[in-house]
Every structure is written in structure tokens, then in C-alpha cells.
């Protein structure tokens, strides 16, 4: 048995932090996608992650469908939920102020959480990892193979999204809506449709996060709220609306949480991320990468 | 987007008198009807929640800000009262005031930085605050008793006259509600109320007209936090037992639901909403247990989509349909 040194411990916490931070980054990217188009925070973002995990459990474990097919199927199902959320809860609102939209998404998150409890019950579910449970060791730190999948999927999401926003007409239209919805509709962009697309997109990203993290941390019906809060802290830390900010913010929050839990106190694990959120709001509300000018004209 | 507010020019004397008389007579009626006598107990909770929602309505409906941290101020009041009275045996009224002072200070510390900025930073800051406070209540076992809660909190009395029955406590709580309602109705009709409405309409226009937007928002936030703390103290002395679950994020959101359901722009709506949600969770939804979450979600969505003015706008809607 190897001796556990402080250095190897630190490395262990760092790896754990980056893994969980990747999930927070995915949640934060989901937040930003909707925020950029509607200027509202979707409080149901965490429920997408929870649904991603539990629907995947249904396909993979209950129906025993191989990962290659169950993963896209799960994303399809959760994306449908995201589209329904927009069509049934967001679009019918007659006077869509930011305040009302925030309240509507809180209501929707309750609805989804309650439905998940009905379907899956209160017990946490496990999912077999994509490539076995034999851990690898690096300089005394243990790495689950699934952690590499998590980080890999974050990289894939980032590359695909960057290409989507820079290279496709729809991505550019979404970015235009983010800058100025009124002007976008003047040049022929269907803003309502873009809001739908943003909900679908962020549901898909959330679902992917849930799918890859479930083999590591299990998943149960009420996990969504805390994931949303952490993702939100990541968002605020990186700067609302900034994709690179979301990734940096997510990784930093994950690291702080893992190091704080390991070195200071595990009981206060959830407090660290939230303290970061408070400090950011009070010291630099525009976030690390957000610009002060932009945050001044924002409604949220 | 233009939102119109019902400007109350007349004083609500008739409504207030009717409301007061109804409250005064309710125990007399309820105790004589079987099946209704335990409603007294629920009505005490309705009163406690109303104290919070009335002030929260000022913050949401008039200043246009969302707070997700009011359950924590509720909890601060309850735990300060509970801990000091059980551990040091001090006068409950003194503890209530200590709770108010602490809540005011905390609200100022959180509200001042986040309300100076435009937008909904308060929602985020209070969200984080609420979760942190719940974790602290759970983790500081030596002081708060942790997740098992704090028991044997003494009752409260006035000048040596113990309020030891439900009916007596009912009158205490609803007396406080009545005073709070009176004060807040007056605030709305005053210069402050007009300033708050103008902020909700357009912050930019309000500040152009010389309204100190940040000052008014902070002021209302602190006021609502102090009242939530009072409600918490009353809650602790009534139940004689508190645990962290009564003050978590879910409770904060329940307060939000009360205000949406009753009607965001009406203080009467705040009381109606508090009554409806309290009866739902203490009486009518008990068979659903945890699935009540789903029902609350559905209620919020239905109200936001079909009845943005809340339950109190129903008479007006029916009236306009009738006249058509």
C-alpha cells in the first residue's frame, strides 16, 4: 500500500474537482444559452441534468440498451422536455417580464421534480460506467475512467457549440437575438423560434451532463436544485452569458468545492461554492470574463 | 411594457373594519362547528405566514425584486428566540427584538451590495444565503440541535399573562398581522409607495424623476426581513419546537407561491395567498405527501399563464365579463 502524501491528496482533490467542475460548467453553459436569448435564468436547468441521469438509467439499466443507442435516445427525450417547457410554460405567458419568467421556470422545476419522484421514487440510481470501474493511478491519486469521459464530453460540447455559434446560420441568429432581440426580428429572425431552440439546446447539454456524471455520483429525483445553484455560481463567477467564462467558472467552483471539502470540512461542502457566488456578486458582479458595459444594460 | 397598478385613493377603512371583525369573530364561529375547530390551529400558521407575505409583497409586487432568502430570516428569528430562551432563559420579547436587530443587520449586509446593481442580483444572493443558512442550522449541532431540531422552547406571555391556548395565540398573531397590514397599506399610499411603484414600472424613469432607487429597494428588503424574523419568533414560541427543514429553500419558494397565487400587486392578495397555501399544505394536500411539490409547480404555472393578477383579480375579471 502506498503512503498517502499531502501532494497525492491534493492531486486527488484536484482531479475530483475538475470532474465535478466539468458538470457545473455544462450546467452553466445551459444557463447561458437560455440567458443569452431571453435574459432570464432558467431555474429548471438542474432538472434537465437530473432527467438526463434518470432517463439514461431507464434506457441503459431497465431496458438494457447499449450506450451507443441509449445516450442519443436520452438526449432526445430530455430535449423534448425542454421544448415542451418552452411551448407549454414560457411561450403562453402574455407579459413575459424577467420576473415572471423566473417564477414560471421555478414552477416548471417543481413540476418536473415531482413527476420524476412519481416515476422513479426517492432512491438514488446507479449507472454502469462507459468503460469499466477499474481505477487508474497517477502519482498516488486514483482516477475513475468515467472522470475522463466527463472531461472528454465537456471538450466535445465546447467544440460543437463553438462551431455551431460561429459557423451555422442558426447559431449566428441565436447570437443576434442575444445582442438585440428587436433588431433581430427586424432582419427576419424568428425570435420565438430561437427561444425554443435555446431551450432545446440547453436541455440537451444538461442531459449530457446528467448522463456522464451518474456513474460517478449516482442520481436521484431531488438533485437538480443543488446542481442548478452550483452551475449558477459558475455562471456568475465566469460572467453571465460568456461561454468561456462558464467553463472557467465551473472548473474553479468544482476545485474550490473539492479542496474545501477535503481540507477544511466536508459538512460545509456546499457552502464554499455559494460563498464564492456571494463574494463575486458583491465584489465584481460582472464576473471574471463578463464586461461591465454589457452587464449594465442587462435586465437580469 | 406598461403595467397598471390599482391606485388606492380611498382609505381601506371598510375592508379593514370587515377584515378585523371577521378575524375577531372567527374563533367564536370555528369553535362551535365540529370539523372546523382545528382550523384555529391552521389559522395561527396562516397569520404567521401572512406577516411575512405582506412585507414580501411590497418587495416583489411593488419594488419588483425576488427574494429567495426569506425563509432564512424566518429561521433566524425562530432560532435566535429558541436558542436564547432555552439556553439562557431570557424574556421572549427581548429575544424577539434581538432577532429583529440581527435580521435587519444581515439583510442590510446582503441587500445593500446586490440592490445597488440593476437587475435581479438579489435573487441570486438570497438564494445562496438561504442554502448557506440551512447548512449552518444543520451543522452547528451544539447550538441548534442540528437536523433533529430544538425542542422545549417556552411559550410567550404579555405582562405575566401566559398566552397558553390556541385562541389566545390566535389573537396575538392576528393582532400583529393587522398592525403590519395597516402600516404597509399606509406605506403604499405614501410617498414611499409611489416611489416603489415607479421603480417597478421603470427604474430608469424613476431615477430620472429623482427617486433614489437603491435606497428604497434596500429599505423595503430590510423591512421585510425584520417582519420575517418577527414571524419566526412567534412561530418558535407557538410550536415550542423548530428544525432546519421549516426554514429551507422550499419554504422560501412557498412564500413566493403564496404571493403569486394571491396576487402580486395586492397586499390583500398576500394574505389570501398565505391562507390558501397554508391550508393546502396543512390540510388539503396531506394525502399527496411529497407529491405536493408537483401540485405547487402546476399551480404556479397556471397562475402565471392564465391569472397573472392572482386570486384577488378574479372578482374584477368576472365583473368585466359580466358587463361585456
Image (cartoon, helix red, strand yellow):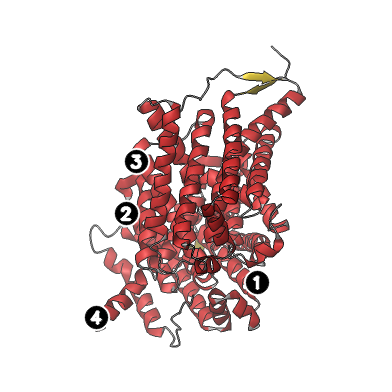
Crowding near the residue tagged with mark 3, few <14, some 14–19, many ≥20 C-alpha atoms within 10 Å: some
Crowding near the residue tagged with mark 2, few <14, some 14–19, many ≥20 C-alpha atoms within 10 Å: few
Chain letter for mark 3, please.
A
Residue at disc 4, secondary structure: helix
Q: Which residue is mark 3?
A: A118
Q: Could you say which disc has been placed on residue B164 in the image?
A: none
| Residue A115, position as x, y percentages in the image | 36, 44
- Front residue (pair B176, A126): A126
| Residue A146, position as x, y percentages in the image | 56, 27
**Gap between marks 4 and 3 measured at Cα:** 41 Å
Q: Earlier in the sequence, mark 2 or mark 4?
A: 2
Chain letter for mark 1, please.
B
Q: Which residue lies at the image location 50% right of the left edge and 48% below the top edge?
A: A202
- Front residue (pair B158, A242): A242
Number of the front mark, 2 or 3: 3
Q: Which residue is mark 2?
A: B283
Q: Are marks 4 and 1 in contact (CB under 8 Å)?
A: no
Whether callout 4 and callout 3 share a subunit is answered: no
Residue at disc 3, secondary structure: helix
Whether callout 1 and callout 3 share a subunit is answered: no
Q: Are marks 2 and 4 in contact (CB under 8 Å)?
A: no
Q: Which residue is mark 4?
A: B322
Residue at disc 1, secondary structure: helix
Amino acid at each position: 500500500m502506498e503512503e498517502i502524501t499531502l501532494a497525492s491528496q491534493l492531486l486527488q482533490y484536484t482531479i475530483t474537482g475538475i470532474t465535478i467542475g466539468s458538470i457545473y460548467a455544462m450546467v452553466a453553459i445551459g444557463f447561458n444559452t437560455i440567458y443569452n436569448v431571453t435574459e432570464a435564468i432558467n431555474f429548471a436547468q438542474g432538472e434537465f441534468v437530473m432527467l438526463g441521469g434518470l432517463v439514461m438509467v431507464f434506457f441503459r439499466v431497465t431496458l438494457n440498451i447499449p450506450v451507443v443507442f441509449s445516450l442519443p435516445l436520452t438526449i432526445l427525450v430530455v430535449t423534448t422536455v425542454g421544448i415542451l417547457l418552452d411551448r407549454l410554460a414560457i411561450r403562453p405567458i402574455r407579459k413575459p417580464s424577467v420576473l415572471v419568467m423566473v417564477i414560471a421556470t421555478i414552477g416548471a422545476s417543481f413540476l418536473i421534480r415531482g413527476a420524476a419522484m412519481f416515476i422513479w421514487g426517492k432512491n438514488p440510481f446507479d449507472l454502469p460506467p462507459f468503460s469499466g470501474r477499474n481505477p487508474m493511478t497517477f502519482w498516488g491519486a486514483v482516477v475513475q475512467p468515467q472522470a475522463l469521459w466527463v472531461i472528454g464530453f465537456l471538450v466535445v460540447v465546447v467544440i460543437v457549440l463553438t462551431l455551431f455559434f460561429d459557423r451555422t446560420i442558426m447559431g449566428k441568429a441565436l447570437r443576434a437575438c442575444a445582442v438585440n432581440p428587436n433588431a433581430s426580428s427586424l432582419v427576419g429572425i424568428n425570435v420565438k423560434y430561437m427561444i425554443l431552440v435555446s431551450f432545446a439546446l440547453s436541455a440537451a447539454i444538461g442531459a449530457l451532463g446528467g448522463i456522464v456524471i451518474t456513474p460517478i455520483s449516482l442520481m436521484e429525483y431531488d438533485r437538480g436544485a443543488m446542481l442548478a445553484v452550483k452551475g449558477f455560481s459558475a455562471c456568475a463567477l465566469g460572467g453571465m452569458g460568456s461561454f468561456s467564462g462558464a467553463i472557467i467558472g465551473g472548473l474553479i467552483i468544482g476545485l474550490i468545492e473539492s479542496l474545501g471539502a477535503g481540507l477544511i470540512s466536508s459538512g460545509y461542502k456546499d457552502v464554499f461554492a455559494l460563498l464564492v457566488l456571494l463574494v463575486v456578486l458583491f465584489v465584481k458582479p460582472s464576473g471574471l470574463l463578463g464586461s461591465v458595459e454589457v452587464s449594465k444594460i442587462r435586465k437580469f | 411594457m406598461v403595467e397598471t397598478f390599482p391606485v388606492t385613493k380611498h382609505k381601506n377603512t371598510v375592508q379593514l373594519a370587515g377584515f378585523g371583525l371577521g378575524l375577531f369573530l372567527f374563533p367564536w364561529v370555528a369553535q362551535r362547528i365540529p370539523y372546523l375547530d382545528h382550523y384555529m390551529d391552521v389559522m395561527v400558521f396562516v397569520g404567521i405566514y401572512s406577516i411575512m407575505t405582506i412585507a414580501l409583497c411590497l418587495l416583489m409586487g411593488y419594488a419588483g425584486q425576488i427574494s429567495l432568502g426569506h425563509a432564512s430570516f424566518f429561521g433566524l428569528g425562530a432560532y435566535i428566540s429558541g436558542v436564547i430562551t432555552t439556553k439562557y432563559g431570557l424574556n421572549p420579547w427581548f429575544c424577539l427584538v434581538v432577532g429583529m436587530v440581527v435580521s435587519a443587520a444581515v439583510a442590510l449586509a446582503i441587500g445593500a451590495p446586490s440592490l445597488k446593481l440593476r437587475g435581479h442580483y438579489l435573487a441570486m444572493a438570497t438564494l445562496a444565503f438561504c442554502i448557506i443558512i440551512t447548512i449552518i442550522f444543520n451543522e452547528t449541532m451544539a447550538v441548534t440541535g442540528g437536523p433533529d431540531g430544538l425542542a422545549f422552547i417556552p411559550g410567550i406571555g404579555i405582562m405575566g399573562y401566559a398566552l397558553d391556548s390556541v385562541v389566545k395565540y390566535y389573537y396575538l398573531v392576528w393582532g400583529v398581522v393587522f398592525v403590519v397590514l395597516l402600516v404597509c397599506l399606509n406605506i403604499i399610499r405614501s410617498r414611499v409607495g409611489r416611489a416603489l411603484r415607479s421603480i417597478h414600472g421603470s427604474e430608469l424613469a424613476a431615477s430620472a424623476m429623482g427617486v433614489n432607487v437603491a435606497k428604497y429597494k434596500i429599505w423595503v428588503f430590510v423591512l421585510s426581513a425584520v417582519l420575517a424574523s418577527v414571524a419566526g419568533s412567534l412561530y418558535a414560541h407557538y410550536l415550542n419546537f423548530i428544525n432546519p427543514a421549516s426554514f429551507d429553500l422550499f419554504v422560501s419558494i412557498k412564500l413566493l407561491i403564496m404571493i403569486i397565487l394571491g396576487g402580486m400587486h395586492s397586499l390583500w392578495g398576500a394574505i389570501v395567498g398565505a391562507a390558501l397555501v397554508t391550508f393546502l399544505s396543512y390540510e388539503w394536500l396531506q394525502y399527496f405527501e411529497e407529491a405536493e411539490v408537483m401540485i405547487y409547480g402546476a399551480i404556479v404555472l397556471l397562475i402565471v399563464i392564465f391569472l397573472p393578477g392572482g386570486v384577488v383579480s378574479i372578482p374584477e375579471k368576472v365583473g368585466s365579463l359580466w358587463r361585456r
